Amino acid sequence: MLARRFAALGLLGLAVILLSLAYTGATNIGQTVEKNRRIDAEFKTIADVVGSFKQRMKRLPSDDELHRILPYTEATRPLAIEVSSQFNQCDNQTDAFANFKSGYVIAIWRGHWWECFAPSSGMSTLGLSSLDYTADWAFLAVVALLALRSVFAAIRIWRRTSELSRRKMS
């Protein structure tokens, strides 16, 4: 009987851990979307500067020129790359970015991958809505369902143990 009660408590502990994991995952998705929106705003500012430079000089700014105009840190230093240079680092949507015939892409290194923005079409590798992370939401839903299943199993075990205990006493 004691083992059953410990099993029920273990399942409740598992449910708490799983629900914590689901909550943390949902919070992280929200923070990612918020950060992506800030980067998107930066992309648009950079696109305005690059567009003005290109109109005036009839070419894209070099990396050094762009860095002088927009004083970013080395970690977030943007690049303006002609599409014809076949820059294929737009990790999420390399194929879509490769289909452009002319224009340029603005890219920012995120530490493990490039985020890209094509000013001519407005296409971006950034997920600007939590719906862009449907695979993550599906995983979190499965985790939450496992947590609920653990709670129901714990309740069932606890009740069954109580019934057996009452039967034994009578």
Image (spheres, helix red, strand yellow):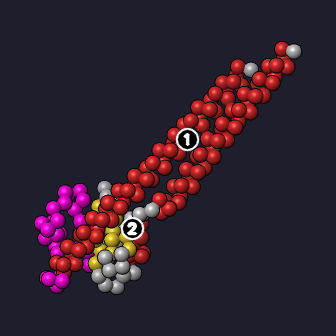
Residue 138: where, in percent of width, then height? 57, 55
Q: What SS does tag 1 mark?
A: helix
Q: Earlier in the sequence, mark 2 or mark 1?
A: 1
Residue 80: where, in percent of width, then height? 24, 72
Under mark 2, the amino acid is: Thr
Residue at image x 72%, y 27%? Answer: 158
Q: Decide if residue 64 is on the left or right side of residue 4.
A: left
Where is 149 relative to 135, above or below?
A: above
Q: Residues within 10 Å of mark 2 (few under 14, many from 20)?
A: many
Q: Residues within 10 Å of mark 1 (few under 14, many from 20)?
A: some
Residue at image x 53%, y 60%? Answer: 134
Circle 1 residue: 19
Task: Place residue 128 in its image quadrant.
Answer: bottom left
Circle 2 residue: 125
Taking depth in this image into account, of 2 and 45 the one nearest to the observer is 45
Q: Which residues are magenta?
A: 55-82
> Is-magenta flag for residue 160?
no
* Labels 2 and 1 touching (C-beta < 8 A): no
> Is-magenta flag for residue 78?
yes
Where is 20 relative to 55, above or below?
A: above
The nearer-to-camera label among 2 and 1 is: 1
Residue 85 appears in the figure: no
Task: Place residue 81 in its image quadrant.
Answer: bottom left
Residue at image x 23%, y 69%? Answer: 46
- Outermost residue, top direction? 169
Q: Decide if residue 87 is on the left or right side of residue 138.
A: left
Q: Quadrant of the C terminus?
A: top right
